[in-house]
């Protein structure tokens, strides 16, 4: 044939470069390269059908008359038996008249078909290919979200580019691998490897990631393989289970047992003997009156006040529940002896506080503010309406625990009982600081209702946590409520983690130091925090960094500043010889947080501050420079004052009072600031309910005598609401049996 003769003389048939590349050939490969139809070097010997034995079948041609072939394994300048027309390999180039996609070209008896160019691809075929390609890309990107953020770990799992990243021989990777195999392999490596071997540790981390990733893929595959009828049946069964759980959860509302209220200890305030201290405390009470009166005047019955606009402000955290500032301020009004205001608030609760709303709420926020506020008001005043409302709301929150693991959802529809998690939380995970900040309130709900269900729910959270392996002894911020496994390995003592650690310590203290499990969990966690997160700056400031997949981010949030008080409060129960160490650690954290205030123009601390790039205790990002009347620094000052009586804590607290008066006080109340480094105030126009519940309460206690709410009798929840210690042998409130 003429074309074969031309080829033997050096004129090569047209070869689709894109096809060669797609099949594995490197661009620019020289003409004599030996490739099979799949783009790999052919292994079979050259047989008949090459140039030695011309093939009589007609060859496919391009519209210009050139033939289209893929090179085979023949020696340079010859065709091999593996020679194959492009149309038979890639259906993109088959003629529309040739039977659609997949139509073979040439080779063997029967007439060959002419090949149309790529432009001849039909619109439907393009659409099908685009759908397939889009689905593949979506699957790849979706899978990445199940993996930690560390680029090093990600590259190791996906590409295995280094021998150190290869799976060990005892780990069965791939679709057939079992979780048990991975666990056995890890245990064997821990026994055989030397302590602290970084290669073994990295390999162990990769094996764990692969194990979790494969488990997620298996679960997804099993769900997709179910028939529609099976999925519908599972939904109906789940609905039936939820309905049964809801009936059981409503049992506490069938009647609360009568109780004998015992007058609380240390709630009658005496005037400080020192005139200067007395004057400062009176000023803080006046600040409370200014905040309360403006809320009453411009936003009464709504959740929060907009002091600049002089109107109401409602956060989505509370759904359609109203009166957050009223409930949050109840105990502050009581201990400041603002009796008329307290009675007004009680009347509103009795007549208007309604939890029968069709809206989604934050379980965490509603618990610490509403449940905590109502419990505190009951324990201080003995008013039965507060106990009734607290238990009623507790019952409404129980459906949040209807998950496979018992770890509650973050968000709950109060009417339907349907829960979900924040969409941004690692793979649909629950947040450590949210599900870990229910324990104190729910133990008291069981105590006041006579029903153990509340205590059972939060004790199950402990059970789940104690079964899990903690990376480096640390608790990640994310836990999947369906699988009961950790999400991304992010660890923080600030936002997303903070109050979990606080509640471990306070659960032990609230039990009259009988809850030894909580004590052990707390001190084990603190030891890991000190080892992996606590660092010193070049100038000697102690700070708590954040841990992300083994890498430290040298940032400390305002929320983290509560930890100074926590370390000091737990010092008395510390392991032998460590009490003074933890007291000093609390003092160092207090000093660092004071520096974050002192280094701003407004003398109020930013939302977060950093220790990198030559910067210490200063916010470097615009979205971290705001102050929203947060209480955490005042909280640490209060504990440090009570435990040390060092006068600097009262001095620092008064500096904060002056800053609040100079920069946050407006005619309509108190407003947060958008940037504490500016020379002039830029207000956010929100008076947060926790300003009355926490910030002003802690300041008031700093300038009060220690016999007001003594720490040996009271525990403060995460919103500074007061809960009494419950001795095992003698309860503050004894429940009678009807």
Image (cartoon, grey):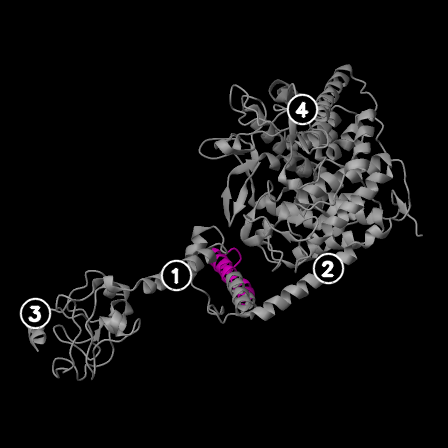
Query: Which mark is drawn over residue 131?
Result: 1
Residue on which disc 3 sits: 10
Closer to the N terminus: mark 4 or mark 2?
2
Say which quarter of the image contains residue 637: top right
Dot 3: element = loop
Residue 263, position as x, y percentages in the image = 89, 36
> Of tags 2 and 3, which is closer to the observer?
2
Closer to the N terminus: mark 1 or mark 4?
1
Does 20 appear above or below 447? below
The N terminus sits in image quarter: bottom left
C-alpha gap between disc 1 and disc 2: 41 Å
C-alpha gap between disc 2 and disc 3: 80 Å
C-alpha gap between disc 1 and disc 4: 63 Å
Residue on which disc 4 sits: 653
Does 687 appear above or below 526? above
Residue 725, position as x, y percentages in the image = 81, 42
Closer to the N terminus: mark 1 or mark 3?
3
Q: Is residue 639 covered in magenta? A: no
Residue on which disc 2 sits: 243
């Amino acid at each position: 044939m003429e074309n074969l003769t031309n080829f033997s003389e050096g004129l090569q048939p047209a070869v689709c470069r894109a096809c060669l590349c797609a099949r594995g050939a490197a661009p620019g490969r020289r003409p004599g390269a030996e490739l099979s139809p799949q783009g790999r070097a052919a292994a079979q010997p050259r047989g008949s059908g090459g140039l030695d034995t011309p093939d009589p079948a007609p060859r496919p041609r391009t519209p210009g008359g050139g033939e289209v072939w893929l090179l085979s394994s023949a020696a340079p300048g010859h065709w091999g038996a593996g020679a194959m027309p492009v149309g038979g390999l890639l259906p993109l180039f088959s003629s529309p008249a040739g039977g659609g996609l997949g139509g073979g070209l040439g080779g063997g008896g029967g007439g060959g078909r002419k090949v149309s160019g790529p432009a001849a691809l039909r619109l439907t075929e393009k659409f099908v290919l685009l759908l397939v390609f889009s689905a593949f890309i979506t699957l790849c990107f979706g899978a990445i979200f199940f993996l930690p953020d560390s680029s090093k770990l990600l590259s190791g799992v996906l590409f295995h580019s280094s021998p150190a990243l290869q799976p060990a021989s005892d780990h069965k990777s791939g679709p057939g691998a079992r979780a048990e195999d991975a666990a056995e392999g890890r245990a064997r490596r821990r026994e055989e490897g030397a302590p602290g071997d970084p290669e073994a540790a990295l390999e162990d981390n990769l094996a764990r990631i692969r194990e979790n990733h494969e488990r997620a893929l298996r679960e997804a595959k099993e769900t997709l393989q179910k028939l529609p009828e099976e999925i519908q049946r599972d939904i109906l069964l789940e609905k039936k289970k939820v309905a049964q759980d809801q009936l059981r959860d409503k049992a506490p509302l069938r009647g609360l047992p009568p109780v004998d209220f015992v007058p609380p200890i240390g709630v009658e305030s005496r005037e400080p003997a020192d005139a200067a201290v007395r004057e400062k405390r009176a000023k803080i009470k006046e600040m409370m009156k200014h905040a309360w009166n403006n809320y009453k005047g411009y936003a009464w019955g709504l959740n929060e006040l907009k002091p600049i606009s002089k109107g109401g402000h409602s956060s989505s955290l509370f759904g359609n529940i109203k009166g957050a500032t009223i409930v949050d301020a109840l105990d502050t009004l009581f201990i400041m002896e603002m009796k008329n205001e307290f009675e007004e608030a009680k009347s509103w609760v009795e007549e208007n506080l309604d939890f029968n709303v069709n809206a989604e709420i934050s379980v965490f926020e509603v618990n610490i503010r509403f449940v905590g506020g109502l419990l505190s008001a009951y324990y201080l005043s003995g008013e039965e309406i507060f106990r009734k409302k607290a238990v009623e709301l507790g019952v409404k929150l129980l459906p949040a625990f209807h998950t496979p693991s018992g770890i509650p959802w973050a968000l709950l529809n109060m009417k339907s009982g349907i829960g979900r998690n924040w969409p941004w939380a690692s793979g649909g995970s629950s947040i450590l600081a949210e599900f870990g900040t229910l324990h104190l309130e729910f133990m008291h709900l069981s105590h006041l209702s006579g029903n153990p269900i509340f205590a059972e729910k939060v004790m199950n959270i402990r059970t789940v946590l104690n079964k899990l392996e903690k990376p480096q002894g640390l608790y990640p911020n994310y836990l999947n409520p369906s699988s009961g496994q950790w999400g991304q390995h992010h660890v923080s003592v600030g936002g997303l983690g903070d109050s979990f650690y606080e509640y471990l310590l306070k659960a032990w203290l609230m039990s009259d130091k009988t809850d030894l499990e909580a004590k052990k969990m707390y001190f084990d966690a603190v030891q890991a925090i000190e080892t992996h997160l606590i660092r010193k700056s070049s100038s000697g400031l102690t700070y708590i960094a954040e841990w992300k997949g083994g890498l430290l981010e040298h940032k400390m949030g305002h929320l983290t500043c509560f930890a100074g008080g926590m370390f000091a409060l737990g010092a008395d129960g510390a392991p032998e010889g460590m009490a003074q160490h933890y007291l000093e650690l609390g003092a160092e954290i207090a000093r660092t947080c004071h520096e974050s205030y002192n280094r701003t123009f407004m003398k109020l601390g930013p939302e977060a501050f950093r220790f990198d790039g030559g910067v210490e205790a200063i916010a470097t990002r615009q979205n971290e420079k705001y102050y929203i009347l947060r209480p955490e620094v005042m909280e640490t000052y209060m504990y440090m004052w009570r435990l040390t009586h060092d006068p600097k804590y009262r001095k620092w607290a008064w500096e904060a009072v002056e800053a609040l008066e100079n920069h946050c006080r407006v005619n309509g109340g108190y407003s947060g600031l958008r940037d504490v480094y500016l020379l002039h105030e830029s207000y956010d126009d929100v008076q947060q309910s926790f300003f009355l519940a926490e910030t002003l309460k802690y300041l008031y206690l700093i300038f009060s005598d220690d016999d007001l709410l003594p720490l040996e009798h009271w525990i403060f929840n995460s919103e500074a609401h007061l809960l009494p210690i419950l001795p095992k042998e003698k309860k503050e409130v004894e429940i009678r049996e009807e």
